[in-house]
Image: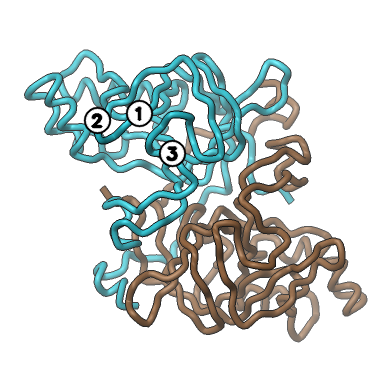
Chain colours: A brown, B cyan
C-alpha cells in the first residue's frame, strides 16, 4: 500500500550552489546545475553518506559522533528569503550568504513542509529525475548572521531570530540525477497529523539519563 | 538551533529478527540482538544503502528504480500487533509472520509516530547507542495476509484492512550499534504541525505529467 502521496504542489529551482570548503568560507558558490550523488551534491563540502554530528543535534549525540548525513543539502525558498531580507532591512538576501545549495519558488511556507516529504524532479521524458527527501526544518545559526554582517554591517545580527521558521529545510538524496536552474519538482507527502503522545523531555540531562 | 526534540516517550524492545532470504520466505527469523550497520541490520535481505523501488512507491518511481533505502528496518509495536491479532481472531500474531525486524512496546499509536522522528537507544554508560530514523508509516501488504493464511487458514485475508494504520513504521540507521532484547530507546521528534498547502494531485498520471 502506498503511503507517500503526490500533491498538487510543484516548485521551480531559481538558484543552485555549493559550499566548496567550509574552512575557507561558509558561503556557497553559484552553479547552473548540481549533480546529485548518493553522498549529496558533487563538490559540496557538507556532503558524504555520514557526517560528524554538530551542535544542531547536541540533544541527540555527543558532538563528533558519526551519523548518517541527513543534511546533504540546504534548500530555501525564494519567497522566504525575500521575507527575511525585508525584515533585515535589505533589498535582497543573496542565497550564497546562507550557504544554500538550492532555492525554490512556488511553495508557501516551504520551511514548514512535512518532514520526510519528497521533492521529485520532473524530466522532459516524463520519468522521474533526481529526488530529494526532506529531513526537516533547518535551524538558523549565527554564522549566517555573521556573513551578512560582513557584507552589510548592521543588518546581520538579527538573522537567527528573523529567519526562525523560514530558513528552509535540510534534505538527502533519495534518487541521483542532475538538477538545473529552472527545473521543476513535485512535492510528495506522508500522511499529515499531529501525534499527541509526546511531550518534550523535562530536560536534556533527564532525557540522557533515560 | 536544535530542531529535533527529545520527548518523554521511551520504548522497550520485545522482539528482534531478520528476513534472511526473501526468495525462500518473507518471514523473519528471531534474533537476540541486531547489529545495525549503515546498510541496515546485519543479515537482513532488505538491507543495503540503496534498493530497487517497489510497488509501495509506484506513484513516485518506475518499479526497479535505484533509490536510497529508507526501508532498512520494519518496526512494529507489541500493542498494535495484539490489536491486529484480536481483530483477526487470533490469540497472538507472531512478529515473524509480518517480516518484522523489531517489536517495541510502550508507545501508543506507534505507527502514527511523526515521520523523521528518531529512536535513540540508551546505553548503560549514558551515551547514545544505535539510532534509527523513522521514515514513515508502513503500508500493509497482502503477502503478510498470505503468510498468516498459510499458518492459520481463514485468519489472514483481512490483514491489509485490519492492519491499516497499525502496521508499524519503516526506518533507516542514523547511528550504527547493537540493539538487544530489552533495550530502551527514546523518541525524538521534529516540530509537529499540519502543512495546509498540499492537496493530493488529481491523478497519478496528472502528477507524472507535471
User: Seen from this angle, which residue lies furthest left?
Assistant: B154
B30 or B139: nearer the eye? B30
Density class for disc 3 (Cα within 10 Å; few <14, some 14-19, many ≥20) is many
Give yes or no for contact between labels 2 and 3 (Cβ–Cβ under 8 Å): no
As helix, strand or loop, the secondary structure at mark 1 comes to: loop
Q: Earlier in the sequence, mark 3 or mark 1?
A: 1
Quarter occupied by residue B121: top right
Same chain under badges 1 and 2? The reply is yes
Residue under numbered circle 1:
B20
Tell me which residue sits at (32%, 34%) in the image: B166
Q: Are marks 1 and 2 in contact (CB under 8 Å)?
A: yes
Task: Identify the subunit bearing mark 3.
Answer: B
Closer to the chain start, of discs 2 and 3, is 2
Q: Secondary structure at mark 2?
A: loop
Q: Position of residue B179 (x, y in %)?
A: 54, 22
Q: Position of residue A14 (x, y in %)?
A: 58, 82
The residue depicted at 46 percent of the width and 78 percent of the height is A184
Give the number of the disc on residue B47: 3
| Quadrant occupied by the C terminus of chain A | top right
Which subunit holds the residue at mark 2? B
Q: Quadrant of residue A73?
A: bottom right
Mark 3 vs mark 1, CA separation in Å: 10 Å
Residue under pointer 2: B24
Does residue A134 appear left or right of residue B59 in this picture? right
Q: Are marks 3 and 1 on the same chain?
A: yes
Label 2: how many Cα within 10 Å (few below 14, some 14–19, many 20+) = few
Pick the front one: A116 or B199? A116
Q: CA distance from mark 1 to mark 2?
A: 8 Å
Q: Position of residue B17 (x, y in %)?
A: 39, 23
Amino acid at each position: 500500500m502506498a503511503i507517500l502521496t503526490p500533491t498538487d504542489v510543484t516548485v521551480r529551482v531559481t538558484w543552485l550552489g555549493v559550499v566548496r570548503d567550509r574552512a575557507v568560507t561558509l558561503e556557497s558558490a553559484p552553479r547552473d546545475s548540481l549533480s546529485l550523488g548518493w553522498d549529496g551534491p558533487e563538490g559540496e563540502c557538507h556532503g558524504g553518506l555520514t557526517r560528524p554530528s554538530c551542535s544542531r543535534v547536541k540533544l541527540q549525540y555527543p558532538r563528533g559522533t558519526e551519523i548518517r548525513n541527513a543534511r546533504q543539502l540546504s534548500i530555501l525558498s525564494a519567497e522566504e528569503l525575500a521575507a527575511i531580507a525585508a525584515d533585515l532591512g535589505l533589498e535582497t538576501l543573496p542565497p550564497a550568504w546562507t550557504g544554500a545549495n538550492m532555492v525554490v519558488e512556488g511553495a508557501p511556507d516551504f520551511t514548514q513542509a512535512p518532514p520526510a516529504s519528497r521533492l521529485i524532479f520532473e524530466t522532459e521524458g516524463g520519468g522521474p529525475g533526481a529526488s530529494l527527501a526532506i529531513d526537516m526544518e533547518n535551524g538558523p545559526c549565527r554564522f549566517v548572521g555573521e556573513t551578512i554582517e560582513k557584507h552589510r554591517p548592521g543588518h546581520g545580527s538579527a538573522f537567527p531570530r528573523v529567519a526562525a521558521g523560514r530558513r528552509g529545510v535540510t534534505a538527502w538524496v533519495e534518487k541521483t540525477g542532475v538538477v538545473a536552474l529552472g527545473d521543476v519538482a513535485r512535492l510528495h507527502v506522508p500522511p499529515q497529523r499531529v501525534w499527541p503522545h509526546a511531550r518534550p523531555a523535562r530536560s536534556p540531562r533527564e532525557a540522557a539519563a533515560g
